[in-house]
Amino acid sequence: MFQMKKIINAVLSASLLLASNAFAADQPPKPVKVDQVKQMNLSATTDLMATVHSRSHIQVTAGVNGRIDWLAEPGSLVHQGDVLVKIDLLPLKLMQLEQQAQLKRAQINVRYLKNEVQRLQKLRQSNSASQFQLDQTQSQYDLANTDIEIADLKLKQIEDQIQRANVTAPFSGVITERLVRAGTDINRSDVLLKILDTEHLEVRLYVPVKYLAFVRKGHGLDISANGQLINAKITSLIPSADPKSQTFEVRINIPSHLNESWAAGQLVKVTVPIQAAKNTLTVHRDALILRKDGTYVVKIDTENKVHRLPVVVENGTFERVSIKGELKHGDSVAIRGAERLSEGQKVVVQ
């Protein structure tokens, strides 16, 4: 009796399978989008939050002592070489004129002493002048030449101060803060403004030190924000762990086309590897069909027929996951329109 029931159940199962295949064969082909199963190196990853920074956000300081005539407003867009701060140049101009007069006076004195030395040398040949007198005048002449050098150096120092009095932008950017106002007396090295480079941005990421072995300079990491996803290479890695947070710093330069949509201070998400990569079969995440009894993918064979196969999902990235199952490199699996397909059903690959 038990054996008879077994035979009947087997016959019914076979009949149902045949009926299902016949039903699937009678259905019109459904459109699907497919992706290839790929053999590739893949590692487990985690998402960390990072911050966008400008590669240059500096304080602009005064080059000389003086009174401010004008300085740029916060929010002003400036180009490299544009004047940011103007200083009252009158005191420096007067010092320049005074030093030019001092230099002229020293030159007159040198000409006089030169003639005097030549006169005494002729008198000395006829013993009409003492050697002491000649030596004394020669010394005065040499000192006068040195005075010219000193006066010329002082004049160049004043000219350098005049040149540095008007502060210019070291790079193109935007003024973020103004710390003094026009009419204020300032000293050299006082902070006047802050300027932000908006053209060269970078992501600064702090990674737990336990993942140091899996992060290297030159590795590409996925970065996402504002619905945009890019893959950029690590440009700097500082392998020095912070004692409190036990993290090390990673820096990644951002492509210039994102300057208008990403801003300094913004948070971004960075995908970081947390295990060594291993060679494995991978599928696109959209190929996975999650059910209570397990996870499946729909394989499309060379005749465009459907085969529903169970898989075991392992490590993954933003787009792809490692799987184990009856698949091989190059197989086609459905990533769109696979949820309601039946075993053996015909499809149209789009």
Image (cartoon, rainbow, N blue to C red):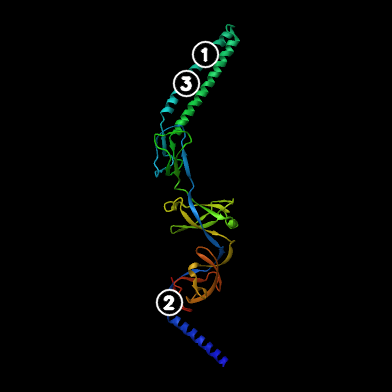
Which residue is pictured at 50% across the width and 64% down the height?
319
Whether label 2 touches label 1, CB < 8 Å: no
Mark 2 or 3: in front is 3
Instruction: Give the mark, 1 or 3, whose residue is nearer the N terminus.
Output: 3
Say which amino acid is labelled 2: Pro
Q: CA distance from mark 1 to mark 3?
A: 20 Å
Q: Where is residue 132, by image quadrant?
A: top right
Whether label 2 touches label 3, CB < 8 Å: no
Residue that sits furthest to the front in the current view: 244
Instruction: Give the mark, 2 or 1, whose residue is nearer the N terminus.
Output: 2
Residue that badge 3 annotates: 102
Label 1 element class: helix
Q: Percent from the top left, x then y, of residue 129?
A: 58, 8
Residue that badge 2 annotates: 29
Q: Percent from the top left, x then y, of residue 202?
A: 49, 51
Say which amino acid is labelled 3: Gln
Which residue is pictured at 49% across the width and 67% down the height?
285
Which residue is pictured at 55% across the width and 92% down the height?
4
Quarter occupied by the N terminus: bottom right
Residue that badge 1 annotates: 115
The residue lying toward the viewer, choosing from 167 and 30, is: 167
Residue 118 falls left or right of residue 195 = right
Residue 49 falls left or right of residue 127 = left
